[in-house]
Image (cartoon, coloured by chain):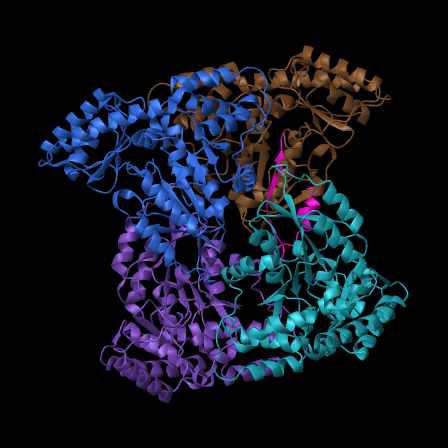
Chain colours: A cyan, B purple, C brown, D blue
Amino acid sequence: MNKAAQALPNFRSDNVAPVSPEIMRAIEEANRGPAAAYGDDDYSKLLNQRFSTLFETEVTVFPVSTGTAANALSLATCVRPYGAIYCHKEAHIDTAEGGATEAFTGGAKLLTLPGRHFRIEPPILREAVTGAAWGVRNRAQPDAVSITQASEYGTVYPLAEIAEIGEIARDKNLSLHMDGARFANGLVRLGCSPADMTWRAGVDILSFGATKNGTMSADAIVVFDQDLVEPLSYRLRRAGQTASKMRYASAQLLAYIEDRLHLRLAAKANAVAAHLGAGLAALPDVQLVAPVEANLIFAKLPALAINRLAANGLQFARRGDEVIRFVARFDSTEQEADEVIALVRRAVAGSTTVGVTTSATSRQK
Amino acid sequence: MNKAAQALPNFRSDNVAPVSPEIMRAIEEANRGPAAAYGDDDYSKLLNQRFSTLFETEVTVFPVSTGTAANALSLATCVRPYGAIYCHKEAHIDTAEGGATEAFTGGAKLLTLPGRHFRIEPPILREAVTGAAWGVRNRAQPDAVSITQASEYGTVYPLAEIAEIGEIARDKNLSLHMDGARFANGLVRLGCSPADMTWRAGVDILSFGATKNGTMSADAIVVFDQDLVEPLSYRLRRAGQTASKMRYASAQLLAYIEDRLHLRLAAKANAVAAHLGAGLAALPDVQLVAPVEANLIFAKLPALAINRLAANGLQFARRGDEVIRFVARFDSTEQEADEVIALVRRAVAGSTTVGVTTSATSRQK
Amino acid sequence: MNKAAQALPNFRSDNVAPVSPEIMRAIEEANRGPAAAYGDDDYSKLLNQRFSTLFETEVTVFPVSTGTAANALSLATCVRPYGAIYCHKEAHIDTAEGGATEAFTGGAKLLTLPGRHFRIEPPILREAVTGAAWGVRNRAQPDAVSITQASEYGTVYPLAEIAEIGEIARDKNLSLHMDGARFANGLVRLGCSPADMTWRAGVDILSFGATKNGTMSADAIVVFDQDLVEPLSYRLRRAGQTASKMRYASAQLLAYIEDRLHLRLAAKANAVAAHLGAGLAALPDVQLVAPVEANLIFAKLPALAINRLAANGLQFARRGDEVIRFVARFDSTEQEADEVIALVRRAVAGSTTVGVTTSATSRQK
Amino acid sequence: MNKAAQALPNFRSDNVAPVSPEIMRAIEEANRGPAAAYGDDDYSKLLNQRFSTLFETEVTVFPVSTGTAANALSLATCVRPYGAIYCHKEAHIDTAEGGATEAFTGGAKLLTLPGRHFRIEPPILREAVTGAAWGVRNRAQPDAVSITQASEYGTVYPLAEIAEIGEIARDKNLSLHMDGARFANGLVRLGCSPADMTWRAGVDILSFGATKNGTMSADAIVVFDQDLVEPLSYRLRRAGQTASKMRYASAQLLAYIEDRLHLRLAAKANAVAAHLGAGLAALPDVQLVAPVEANLIFAKLPALAINRLAANGLQFARRGDEVIRFVARFDSTEQEADEVIALVRRAVAGSTTVGVTTSATSRQK
């Protein structure tokens, strides 16, 4: 990577974020002498208590090292091998986790649904569930619904929509899983309590993302349906997801929710994204693909302009020829957003000239 | 836990260790601004290079969050679903990983072998391999051998023994996996090079343990057989073992091998263990179950004495009624060892009196 | 089932067929005294030879008890757990086998494609394959293509189309699987040799269906790519699909291909289907959903007429509210077809009157 | 195979048996015109009723094509992926089914136990169950016990022993599975009712073997614990074990239990085995390895004698260098047994002379 490129603001992904200073301090504080392993340490013992307070109900929390593990193991605990999971057709569990859910469930099926703004629409879900081949032995049996909050495209389910999905699920005895890779970003958008956005709306199990918002490979599964706790605990161990030195992940997660740190970090990311989104939307030849409700911006612009931006060394992700993604982080700034807006303005203006070809940035990252 | 108990030295496990100061500094240094995700950062890019230097051959390194993941995913890459893996009957992969290897291989069989000092004996392996039901369709087909260095009981395979096992494996086209949860402790004992203890002796893939010896949930898989690299890379992602913010694990692993830090840390643990082992062996009514060659001590003593030690709040692990395990760490001291020796002396001396009953400390930890 | 209903012709499925007299005789002849088990009997030993003659190349044949086992185990042998299989969106492997392919592959993904006349269209496949996320670690990696000949809707791939699909597959190193549940019906339609319809067009492995066309739960996997033979043989045994008394299945399969019996039986079914299809197509308010090229007829008619037919006790399968399926068998007759045509004519004519509601006949059968 | 060899009696396995004439007639009678598929035919509908009468309780019966499928799918329905199954160390599920149980359970562990006469001894089971690592997250959790009646060595559990095992299982909430590959042979030996040998003694699910005793690849799973019925029905379909033309298997199973046919056939086999066992035991240098209680005889004799018998073309199975197995079938005769006794007498008498080397008959068959 050349110097010039490094100097440009990086809106490629929230996975490129560093660890927030508050989290770093928590890690350092946890690093004092020996501590019991596999969750018997003082930090891990506090997790359930503090998260239960945060969620205003009794929850059980399991730290995991990645969001893929959180999603796939949560779903494996809810779904029979011959079961099926409804999700949006852009859901990360179907498009970007290497088949982890199929692997950990023993081959369950993901049934993908269309839906405006990259969210499952309750009427579409209801129709699918109603028309499912219930009891037919050669057809996958619906066992769960998975929604992503905030969604993979940065849109956010309103509470009423989650509640409606929760009701459909409950009616048919389906588990409701929430992929909360950007949970705090969704919370900030809605300004509601974690309880309102989850179990009060029918969520049974939550992938509680924290890594994208300031921790160091420390995500968690938060379980509301206590029947899932025991089987999940075995599946985690068997999946190599039970850390021996769990105190370090637990200390991070405690710090992450203390004094609303998670909300403060996410609020920063959302604000920069809103600023960047508004600035881009105001440019000629640029359209937003989805409303900017969290920290992601998807913009449609001419392919030539995209190539030009890439050639300049700007970091972003592509989605096809004419759509790019920017992601704001807790450590992003409005100045950086302004810089990107200026770059895009120039690239679009010049995009009638021949652009340079660049290798596509892969979808994987 | 009461105050008195906390004040006692803790020889329960190397999993209770903190992170070494050098590793902590590396984490802090890595925490500077954004960095590419999923292994495209500067630290991760250095990993293969530095480990190739360390191992004196081209290797590929994959950071993982636990030793269970390292073992099970390494083996899943070597073994067909209808395959079999030879291991010692006390191997962690069979006795203490919750069936992770069976899960990730799709149901392969672990064929356990007896062996003195908790090591596979080459003649026993040779006989098993020779007598295997090769080509018989209703019998698991041997695909791999897994050895643990240092072993689960703190014994260490001499180089000639590994080489002999490697030769048996190669003759039958079996992969040789080394569970190196305590790899550095084995190296220190033998005083040999990492190359001699692995690929030069026939090892194809290594679970490179670092967490027990000073890192923070950062272990790795080191691949010598380059044919395994591609399939392993997919399996890791699918297992939720590819960290988005990989730089933090990579920075730790780089620091861990820099200036022989891993050897210095392990040497400390081994030395304290040797001191503790010698002290215990000299006590009446105490016998060592296995020679102390790494950082583990297994001692046989009267059940009453064990109960008394537990009642005192000493931290250790039990193996049946009359055997206990002590584990020395890089941060253990000879003074702590002396304290334990004194406690055991008193407990044994008093064990003809009625001991107190304590709940067994579980094998899990 | 009432008498009246039983007296009506049954076009519900070719799974309701009896065993043809020739096959029955073969079973009886095989039933003489003891015979070696698990395929070492004289019948089974002949299988590879006779099928190799039929297919004009060296093939290996494995009898299995169901088409689901044939499909799922064939594919499991071609596809890595993190692999993907392209198939038509109406493919039986995706819609009607209870997730068998996901189960036996260890969680591979089925990537479904649209396509006119219920066949994969080569340009659509080429585009999908070209645009696949090759090498991207969090995306399923294409490993196979599966086509159904004759298709689930009774259409038949022309040879040139299979060859084109075969070429696309070969270019990308994908295995080509053919679900030949109605293989003989396809052969009869094309009037070509089995070789032309399979390996000469690029097919690597074939689910050779026979049960729907006259055998008694005796299907087979025919392997052209000899690299698949050994792994498949283990997978079959492990799946409980290696019959101890294999002679009975083998004797049936030998009789099935002797003197072109399979073609004679399929020709009868196809002819009755053509007759029935033509008769239905000539009725007012009835349209064929797909051309009748094998032994299946899909007809669109008013929902009221369908309900009336069901109320009369006619046996057929439903596909949604206005589409029904008829299946002709080797033991169907033109008279029966005429009877159905007359019934449908009357039902359609009367369908402006209120029909009776019947429970939908399930898709499972 | 030369003429002479063919002329010799065949005691190699009960898998070499033909189909009994009564079963053959039932198949022919079932072959009349079309019949509903996937178990909705008249024969299949009768199965549950007739078997419920036979077992004196409500049971659900699922025909399957092999005993391996019966065992592995029964156990997969009782056992969690992180579960464990206790079985004898000679149990077929562990030694001779290609890992089917591991595959279908998703990687559960088989915990093998020693036991005299190749049966699990209740005290050994009780100790194992009591000492199990209940609740420990990194250890397989006991979910089932599997016993084989008659055992793989032709011994038969007395009712009291089964009941004791059933009680141990019930106490710990374990499912009790019976591998009844030779169920009728066990029944004949005990002279008890099927109910006494199964659910009254605590059996929850039974692999009801029939193929070895006269059917044509038609075994069944008989479910006593009705909670297992629904999940099993899905697992069967997904495993490719739900026959479309189920009537043929069902007709066989109905005929098999009609008028106690299964008992008459097994009685014949047991009687010939008893005769053969007694004759062999009376020979010098020949010892029975286990009491002959069903239709299997295991005899120890000099290796030279075994080689001589093999060279003569006698069909039997080997177990190591000095043990051979003979299996009597419903179609075996006392004359054949006498012939074998005479051959063995001669082989033993001549075994001090140099024998010929023969290729070992494989364990697979």
Answer left or right for B220 relative to D365. Answer: right
User: Percent from the top left, x then y, of residue A43?
Assistant: 56, 77
Residue C31 vertical position relative to residue D291 in the rendered view, above or below: above
Quadrant in which the N terminus of chain D appears: top left
Residue at the limit of the structure toward the bottom, as seen here:
B335
Q: Nearer the viewer, residue A203 or D65?
A: A203
Residue D124 belongs to magenta span: no
Q: Nearer the viewer, residue B151 or C87?
A: B151
Residues in magenta, as a range: C125-149
Answer left or right for A229 relative to D139. Answer: right
Residue at the limit of the structure toward the top, as seen here:
C335
The answer to which quarter of the image holds residue A340 is bottom right
Residue shown at the point (34%, 62%) measured from the top left = B90
Residue shown at the point (62%, 83%) measured from the top left = A25
Residue C136 belongs to magenta span: yes
Q: Is residue A217 visible?
A: no
User: Percent from the top left, x then y, of residue A290?
Assistant: 82, 60
Quadrant in which the C terminus of chain D appears: top left
Q: Nearer the viewer, residue C212 or D103?
A: D103
The answer to which quarter of the image holds residue D342 is top left
User: Percent from the top left, x then y, of residue D233?
Assistant: 55, 37
Q: Nearer the viewer, residue D67 or A330?
A: D67
Residue at the limit of the structure toward the front, as seen here:
B354
Give the total of numbered labels.
0
Residue C202 vertical position relative to residue B51 in the rendered view, above or below: above
Residue shown at the point (63%, 42%) measured from the top left = A140
User: Percent from the top left, x then y, of residue D211?
Assistant: 40, 28
Q: Is residue B55 visible?
A: yes
Answer left or right for D134 relative to A287. Answer: left
